[in-house]
Image (tube, coloured by chain):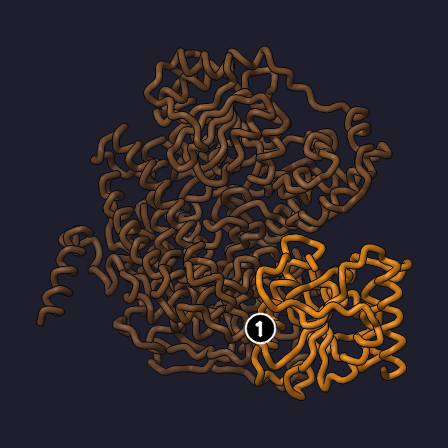
Chain colours: A brown, B orange
């Protein structure tokens, strides 16, 4: 009885928070889901896509019983085994990532509510009515004001605390439950990102309901170093937008150069197309060491932790503007502006200034004062050659390189006056600086690289924010039927095997009329390539969310709009209600929306969390080879897997035998393999014969292009009937199918996992 | 021993046995009932004495009748060189299959008892070997690259000179041909 009362009380509380009395849609089964509420969905996913654990460390060193050796079947002092420990670490990584976005969202929301008030209306323009697909689907709330977003983010905070609690010593003891919790954290992350970006769009008046956003200058050489330069590093636009306001108000906007690295660059260029985007995280140390920035303003996430040291070495002034990264600097928020400026200019002191207005004024005054005194000349070729001559090719630089290449060979070539190899290696450099730190002869490798690095500049389209409802209406049918072969999202960080890979992949799939969307550092590097006519992909392809379109959605937090677009297809095209209806929507995406994420350079915990959130929603993700260091993938066993679905029309369970999508989290060793895996992971059980034939056409042709001819070894698993076979390969495929003893399969009317596992959701809920 | 690429440094107890003697390597391979050779894309990039490393790999397979699993885009070059791989999986997929003791193997004769990795990017290779070290007690692993892989059962040391590696591979092929 007491339990029933408690459940009723909780439900009443949840209904109050989500304003259940407003009947925009009926409230579904899981408003504000807690850890157990979607666990059965997770377990159903994990039955097909079991965690593949690659321990990065065989020990546990999280409590004073340890270190405990967990090798093979050993257990730690608390009883934990190596698999469960991996699940625990994965959950911790996802929580770090989710927290980074949630704290960003919380901060920016507070900042903007202070500026505009909590009743500021959420208006994303005339083309976007479904403003917050994640918040609607997960929380069950349709947010109308900035104040409503607080409800969503407070829900995230609460869940994060419970999840983190489970990682304490002596708690969860199942790797699958840790995975369910990681999936929960990933889902929460998408809610948090959505809160952040909706608040930013509304509060900063970013572009919205438009595809054709301005083209912005991209590249380190795009920065006008004759002007005082203020560099923003990180993710949170609270600071950079205030600096822009300050410069505009004081008539200084044309006198100071503004540039950004990492996602804060994308945010800044959404506020002012005049700001320059230098590039991804991997260019951070390189650019800072160039000394071009007079003032560096850090905010949060993806900032180097040795920033004060590096700023001092480069002769740049540093202001830390957010509490998340204060570097041990004196907090000058309460100090007189003139005194801070004096100490920064005369004493070369760095400060934390948490008041954005004050930070903006200080940064401007310091930059304008010190810029004329600073020498911003790049190293000359002959100087680089002299420095390179100190190299004795000891190989230490190669041994510490996370991207495993031999920069020492490039330096040795420079010593002979040849910069070609180093120029090539600049494309492989992930910018960590470990080579230089390890060099016993202290050769300034990054400075030498300045000479070799391309001085080319490019264009990137400013982040556009959410996909428009009108676009979803246009593409909903062709995506779910398969006639648009897929949505490919290039997302995430810049730990690339080769910085050119993303542009090459994006170009390949845009040319093939996939819908290509990009975000974050991937959006930047995709712009760092030009075709034979000198056009970047942003100039070459239309900016629409449509077949053959290439859209920069925005920064890291804008990833929520990419996954949100999949949700919107279920709602706008298929008319499925979103409100607290997560299982139905995720099931729809998994079985019918041919979307795949490619986090080719993922390095951060945020990328782990975003990808895991995509996985819970039914979107598979391909990662670059180094990402095996995340420790966990979700892989199927193809023919050995359980590919039964419910045919919702016939209410019958059907064994399709079709591994689609084949994996949920997958590492490809090479770009070539990724090129073949992308079209395969866009295959869905709901494809019409025409759509399937189009998808298989791309799968086969890319296989032939990159795998050297023949047909894919698993092709027979994806051909249901003769009509699925692409016309151009009809003869060859028929012969192959005969050879392997293929038999046609009955079509599935409405494929769903609902009804194949214990859930409160009735099968009829998936019928629209 | 510390692996050549420091990102692969072992944080654990159980490390690979280092073997430098090609005859000993050959004996281990020849004693295996169902060995498997997993070939990675680095074999397409590296040459020793003007000969593509993939050619050495194919000679090893031929000398001891070892089935080949081609990962990534290795298959294309293999076909060009006149050899069809017994199976095509990417490295994470073949490892996923191998960790299942009941898997039938690439020749459908039962899971493999010795898996030889050659030409995989070292960080991915080391992670893959970690999977098998912890979750596949039914098989042993071996590497043929010139770097030390602590998560394998048998590994070469870090070979500073390519000539040493070339000598080792040639001796291995000879020993396999001789039958140990």
Category of crowding for the residue at label 1, using alpha-carbon neighbours closer than 10 angstroms: few (below 14), some (14–19), many (at least 20)? many
Note whether A707 is above or below A524 in the view shown.
Answer: below
**Count of marks placed on residues:** 1
Residue A342: x and y in percent read 45, 12
Q: Residue at 28% of width from left, 53% of height from top?
A: A136
Note whether B129 is above or below A414 in the view shown.
Answer: below
Q: Is residue A690 visible?
A: no
**View extreme (front): residue:** A65
Quarter of the image where one finds residue A390 = top right
Quarter of the image where one finds residue A248 = top left
Q: Residue at 39% of width from left, 68% of height from top?
A: A78
Note whether A92 is above or below A229 in the view shown.
Answer: below
Image side of residue A236 versus residue A768, left or right: right
Q: What residue sits right under mark 1 in the picture?
A: B96
Residue B3: x and y in percent read 69, 58
Quadrant holding the C terminus of chain A: bottom left
């Amino acid at each position: 009885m007491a339990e029933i009362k408690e459940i009723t009380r909780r439900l009443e509380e949840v209904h109050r928070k989500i304003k259940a009395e407003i009947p925009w849609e009926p409230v579904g089964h899981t408003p504000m889901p807690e850890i157990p509420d979607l666990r059965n969905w997770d377990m159903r996913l994990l039955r097909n896509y079991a965690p593949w654990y690659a321990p990065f460390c065989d020990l546990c060193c999280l409590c004073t019983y340890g270190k405990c050796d967990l090798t093979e079947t050993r257990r730690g002092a608390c009883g934990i085994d190596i698999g469960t420990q991996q699940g625990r670490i994965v959950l911790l990584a996802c929580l770090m990532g989710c927290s980074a976005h949630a704290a960003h969202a919380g901060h920016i929301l507070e900042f903007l509510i202070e500026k505009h008030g909590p009743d500021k209306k959420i208006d994303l323009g005339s083309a976007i009515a479904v403003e917050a697909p994640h918040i609607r689907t997960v929380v069950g709330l349709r947010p109308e004001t900035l104040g409503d977003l607080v409800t969503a983010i407070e829900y995230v905070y609460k869940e994060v605390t419970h999840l983190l609690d489970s990682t304490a010593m002596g708690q969860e003891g199942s790797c699958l439950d840790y995975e369910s919790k990681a999936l929960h954290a990933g889902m929460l992350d998408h809610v948090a990102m959505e809160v952040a970006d909706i608040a930013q769009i509304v509060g900063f008046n970013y572009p919205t309901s438009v595809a054709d956003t301005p083209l912005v200058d991209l590249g380190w050489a795009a920065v006008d170093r004759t002007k005082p330069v203020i560099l923003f590093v990180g993710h949170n636009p609270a600071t950079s937008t205030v600096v822009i306001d300050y410069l505009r108000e004081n008539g200084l906007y044309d006198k100071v150069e503004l540039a950004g690295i990492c996602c804060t660059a994308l945010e800044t260029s959404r506020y002012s197309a005049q700001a320059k985007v230098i590039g991804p995280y991997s260019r951070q140390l390189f650019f800072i060491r160039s000394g071009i920035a007079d003032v560096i303003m850090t905010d949060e996430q993806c900032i180097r932790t040795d920033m004060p040291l590096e700023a001092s070495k480069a002769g740049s002034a540093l202001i830390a503007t957010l509490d998340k990264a204060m570097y041990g600097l004196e907090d000058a928020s309460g100090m007189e502006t003139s005194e801070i400026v004096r100490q920064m200019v005369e004493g070369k002191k760095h400060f934390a200034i948490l008041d954005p207005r004050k930070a903006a004024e200080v940064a401007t005054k310091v930059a304008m004062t010190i810029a004329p005194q600073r020498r911003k000349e790049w190293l000359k070729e002959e100087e680089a050659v002299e420095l390179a001559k100190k190299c004795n090719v000891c190989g230490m630089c190669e041994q510490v390189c996370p991207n495993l290449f031999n920069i020492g060979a490039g330096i040795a070539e420079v010593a002979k006056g040849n910069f070609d190899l180093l120029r090539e290696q600049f494309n492989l450099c992930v910018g960590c600086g470990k080579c230089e730190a390890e060099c016993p002869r202290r050769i300034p490798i990054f400075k030498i690289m300045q000479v070799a690095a391309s001085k080319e500049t490019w264009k990137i389209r400013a982040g556009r924010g959410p996909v428009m409802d009108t676009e979803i209406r246009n593409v909903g049918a062709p995506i779910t039927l398969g006639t648009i072969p897929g949505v490919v999202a290039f997302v995430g960080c810049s730990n690339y095997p080769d910085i050119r890979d993303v542009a090459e992949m994006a170009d390949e799939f845009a040319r093939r009329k996939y819908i290509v969307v990009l975000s974050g550092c991937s959006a930047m590097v995709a712009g760092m390539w030009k075709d034979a006519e000198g056009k970047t992909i942003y100039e070459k392809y239309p900016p629409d969310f449509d077949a053959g379109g290439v859209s920069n959605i925005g920064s890291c937090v804008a990833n929520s709009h990419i996954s949100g677009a999949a949700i919107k297809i279920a709602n706008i095209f298929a008319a499925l209600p979103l409100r607290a209806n997560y299982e139905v929507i995720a099931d729809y995406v998994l079985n019918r929306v041919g979307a795949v994420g490619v986090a080719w350079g993922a390095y951060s915990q945020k990328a782990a969390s975003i990808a895991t959130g995509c996985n819970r929603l039914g979107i598979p993700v391909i990662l670059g080879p180094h990402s095996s260091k995340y420790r966990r993938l979700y892989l199927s066993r193809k023919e050995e897997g359980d590919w039964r679905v419910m045919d919702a029309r016939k209410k019958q369970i059907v064994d399709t035998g079709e591994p689609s999508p084949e994996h949920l989290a997958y590492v490809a060793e090479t770009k070539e393999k990724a090129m073949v895996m992308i079209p395969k992971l866009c295959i869905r059980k709901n494809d019409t014969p025409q759509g399937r034939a189009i998808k298989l056409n791309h799968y086969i042709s890319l296989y032939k292009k990159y795998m050297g001819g023949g047909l894919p070894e698993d092709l027979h698993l994806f051909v249901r009937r003769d009509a699925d076979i692409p016309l151009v390969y009809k003869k060859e495929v028929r012969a192959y199918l005969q050879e392997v003893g293929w038999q046609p399969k009955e079509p599935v009317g409405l494929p769903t996992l609902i009804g194949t596992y214990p859930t409160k959701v009735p099968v009829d809920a998936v019928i629209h | 021993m510390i692996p050549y690429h420091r990102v692969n440094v072992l944080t654990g107890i159980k490390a690979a046995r280092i073997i430098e003697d090609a005859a000993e390597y050959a004996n281990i391979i020849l004693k295996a009932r169902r060995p498997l050779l997993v070939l990675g894309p680095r074999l397409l990039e590296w040459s020793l004495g003007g000969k593509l490393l993939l050619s050495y790999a194919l000679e090893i397979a031929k000398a001891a009748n070892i089935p080949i699993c081609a990962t990534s885009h290795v298959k294309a070059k293999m076909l060009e060189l006149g050899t069809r791989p017994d199976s095509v999986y990417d490295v994470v997929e073949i490892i996923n299959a191998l960790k299942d003791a009941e898997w039938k193997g690439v020749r459908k004769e039962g899971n493999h008892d010795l898996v030889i990795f050659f030409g995989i990017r070292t960080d991915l290779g080391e992670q893959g070997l970690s999977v098998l070290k912890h979750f596949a007690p039914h098989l042993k692993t071996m590497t043929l690259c010139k770097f030390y892989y602590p998560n394998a059962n048998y590994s070469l040391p870090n070979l500073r000179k390519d000539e040493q590696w070339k000598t080792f591979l040639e001796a291995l092929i000879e020993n396999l041909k001789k039958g140990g």
